[in-house]
Image (cartoon, rainbow, N blue to C red):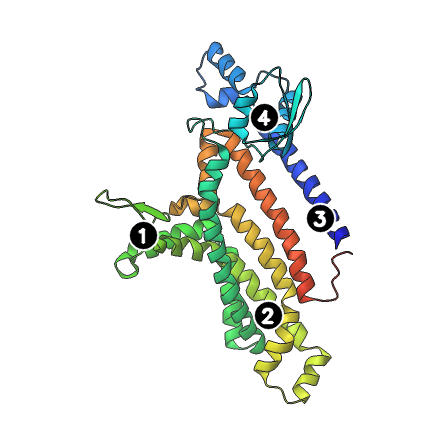
Amino acid sequence: MLRYFLHKLTYAFLTLFGVVSLVFVLFNGLGDPARMMLDQNASATQVAQVKHKYGFDQPLLKQYVYYLNDLSPLSVHSKTKTDFTAINKRFKVVKLLNTKQNTIVLKAPYLRVSYFKQGKKVSSIIGETLPNTAILAILSISIAIVLGVLMGIFSALYKDSFLDKTIALVSTIGMSIPSFFAAIVFAWFFGFVLHKYTGLNMTGSRYEVDDFGEGIFVQWKNLILPAVVLGIRPLAVIIQLMRNSLLEVLDQDYIRTAKAKGLSQYQIIRKHALKNAMNPVVTAISGWFASLLAGAVFVEYIFGWNGLGKEIVNALNQSDLPVIMGAVLVIASLFVVINILLDLVYAWLDPKVKLYE
């Protein structure tokens, strides 16, 4: 077990280090951030002032080292160049070691501040929007899991029947429709054409302002359409995987033995076949859940759902590089965590899987 966790921690560190390096180069080495922040007609003096304020006038390698230092929980700060009181206010640090010139501190990763939101911390922006995206992703994958597993089971039990072919057609259509197109169609049809019957809105987020200015209230119905749209593609994948995996399991010798013992079809599926057929489905679920966290950009933007995806679009439109970089790093970290959890689920589903291998 210890060997497993050391291996995974090394993998996570290398993955995140690669993501940090790539993101930094893409957003700092291939353009002029100061010019992107300002109007193209800005004077050279204005550009120079912005570069000095955000450290863009430093060599790229030095900027990269400073960025890693900000992200690292264990960081070093110079006493001669920086006021430690200001550092403590920014990072909320714990002093570990003092030297003549430097102070080594323990802190939360610092994602810096937004260029366009009056110096608001990127961590605060992500903290406000990520829960909305997580709620949307969890509901979407839950819909896909419940319907996908049930439809996959029925499709396998009634192989080559009209029901099987109908489900296969539905899943094929679901896979072929891009999420942004489905979002537009669903928003228009259910939120506009059928609004008086469904009561659903074309756009809206989890919180809305009362028309009479009496405060903010939760509007859960705004979650329905984006959750359904976001769950269409993983639903189609889970159906096909569940069907094919279950058919393969039902053809095994131990299933024939269970039938010979007089067990009902329900008992065979529940006690013997379902758990063994879930391995490829779990792989798809974990991958799609991580993708939903990262790929809800267009769906959130079209439905006006104030999540991390919509925030990324707004940051791209404004060239708000710290927000973009912070969001990418958070999503990459979630991918790493989900992969580790996936291995634990595998070990539970299949005792032959050893975590230390």
Crowd rating for badge 2 (residues with CA inside 10 Å; few <14, some 14–19, many 20+)? many
Residue indicated by mark 4 = 28
Alpha carbon separation for disc pair 4 and 3 = 30 Å
Alpha carbon separation for disc pair 1 and 2 = 35 Å
Q: Which mark is residue 243?
A: 2
Helix, strand, or loop for circle 1?
loop
Task: Tell which circle, 1 or 2, labels the residue nearer the N-terminal end.
Answer: 1
Helix, strand, or loop for circle 4?
helix
Say which residue appears at 54% left-offset and 27% top-offset.
Answer: 88
User: In the image, 162: left or right of 215?
Assistant: right
Location of the N terminus by quadrant is bottom right
Alpha carbon separation for disc pair 3 and 1 = 44 Å
Image height of 64 relative to 81, above or below: below
Amino acid type at image mark 2? Arg
Helix, strand, or loop for circle 3?
helix
Image height of 16 relative to 167, above or below: above
Q: Quadrant of residue 101?
A: top right
Amino acid type at image mark 1? Asn
Image height of 31 relative to 193, above or below: above
Q: Which mark is residue 334?
A: none
Alpha carbon separation for disc pair 3 and 2 = 32 Å
Observer-side mark, 4 or 2, equals 4
Say which residue appears at 46% left-offset and 13% top-offset.
Answer: 46
Asked whether residue 312 is in view, the answer is: no
Q: Position of residue 172 (x, y in %)?
A: 53, 62
Residue indicated by mark 1 = 201
Asked whether residue 81 is in view, the answer is: yes
Q: Position of residue 271 (x, y in %)?
A: 62, 77
Residue indicated by mark 3 = 8
The foreground one among 145 and 131 is 131
